[in-house]
Amino acid sequence: MSRVCQITGKGPLTGNKRSHSLRATRRRWNVNLHTYKVEIDGKVYKVRMSARAYKTLNKSEKNA
């Protein structure tokens, strides 16, 4: 499974890990993915989405 949010499309970011001596080795920052049950048009689906996207969806539900 790829580490991509199914709602926002966010994927992992890459960069350098820096040691104390400033040697650079490649690393990646993965998205904080969780599996949530989401109701869409009356049907319940399992969706892999980031925790940030889940919080945003819940915030918009509370205000509606």
Image (cartoon, grey):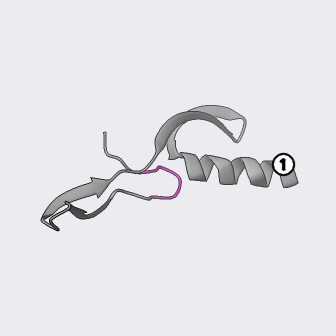
Q: Residue at x 12, y 65 (%)?
A: 23
Is residue 45 shown in magenta? Answer: no
Query: Which quarter of the rendered picture does the N terminus lie within?
Result: top left
The residue furthest front is 20
Q: Please state if 4 lies on the left or on the right of 52 as rendered.
A: left
In the rendered view, tell whether residue 41 sits above or below residue 25.
above
Residue span colored magenta: 5-9
Residue 62 locus on image (x, y percent): 84, 48
Kindly identify which residue carries mark 1.
Answer: 62
Residue 35 seen in the current view: yes
> Quarter-wise, where is residue 27 in the image?
bottom left
In the rendered view, tell whether residue 4 sits above or below residue 15.
above
The residue furthest right is 64
Q: Residues within 10 Å of mark 1 (few under 14, many from 20)?
A: few
**Amino acid under label 1?**
Lys
Q: Residue at x 22, y 63 (%)?
A: 18
